[in-house]
Amino acid sequence: MEFSDNDKRLAVLIDSDNVSYSYVKPLLEEIARYGTPTIKRIYGDWTQPESGGWKGVLLENAITPIQQYRYTTGKNATDSTLIIDAMDILYGEKVGGFCIVSSDSDFTRLATRLREAGMLVIGIGEQKTPEPFIAACDRFIYLEIIAPKQEPAKKPEMFRNGSQHGRARQKVPQKVMDLIASSVNDIADEDGWAFLGDVGNLILKKQPSFDSRNYGYSKLTPMISSLGLFDIDRRDTSNRGIKHIYVRDKSFVQGEKQ
């Protein structure tokens, strides 16, 4: 995936008003997939009683708490402090990207500005996050899928139509299947085949919040396989044991993209 680069230095800026401390450990593990979080700061009013649960978590994960008093009721001073810090880091630190942890649309312009400066911007927030902030990021990840609630294991069930593909299509909305199909067709070669890595990157450019885990799949490959809408070709590479995966819309007709 284009964004996976463990050497990329990331600044992680967390709005404590928009995330529970129970998410911090899985959140940092998720961020590590995209780079190394070298700057880790969290913003809030630490004089408030409800902030007590954060102390151990911040020490454990080497996150620097930034104090911001609530000067006026109803005004969020945390947002402006985070934005000022982000701009200071942009011009004064050697980072390759930012991770903004918040569900607040007030950070939309910040995300846009950082991307204009050539920074990778990853947003993390709840599913209630407004669309403008999501669209302003290179990638947006929902908190709900980082640490999902554990459910008892269930034995596989067959739907009335007896089709595993039918079950998969019930889990994935039609607009998502259309997004995948259009992305495959957009970059397919003359024979209809598209490299899955490129497909994944294009999908994220079109819809930054796309994540196969939103639909119960750990990776894009098993998700596409389960739909039954695409042919899959696993091709050998010069590196033994590694295969490149190509996909093609089953409706493809030679010489024409349907």
Image (tube, rainbow, N blue to C red):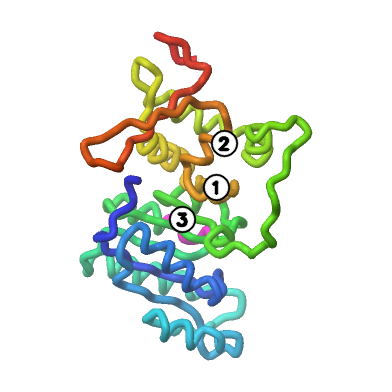
Q: Position of residue 95 (x, y in %)?
A: 25, 63
Q: Residue at the spot x=47%, y=25% of the render?
A: 231
Q: CA distance from mark 1 to mark 3?
A: 29 Å
Mark seen at residue 217: 1
Is the C-beta separation of discs 2 and 1 under 8 Å? yes
Amino acid type of the residue that numbered disc 1 sits on in the rendered structure: Tyr
Q: Which residue is mark 2?
A: 226
In this orientation, which residue lies closer to the viewer: 100 or 226? Answer: 226
Q: Is residue 234 above or below residue 41?
A: above
N-term-proximal mark, 1 vs 3 = 3
| Residue 235 picture quarter | top left
Q: Residue at the spot x=36%, y=74% of the render?
A: 40
**SS of the residue at dot 1?**
loop
Amino acid type of the residue that numbered disc 2 sits on in the rendered structure: Ser
In this orientation, which residue lies closer to the viewer: 244 or 147? Answer: 244
Q: Which residue is mark 3?
A: 108
**SS of the residue at dot 3?**
helix
Mark seen at residue 160: none
Q: How many marks?
A: 3
Q: Position of residue 79 (x, y in %)?
A: 47, 70
Q: Which residues are magenta?
A: 104-109
| Residue 196 picture quarter | top left
Q: Residue at the spot x=41%, y=74% of the render?
A: 81
Amino acid type of the residue that numbered disc 3 sits on in the rendered structure: Thr
In this orientation, which residue lies closer to the viewer: 40 or 135? Answer: 40
Query: Disc 2 or disc 3, which is closer to the eye?
Result: 2
Q: Residue at the spot x=32%, y=46% of the render?
A: 2
Q: Position of residue 3 (x, y in %)?
A: 34, 50
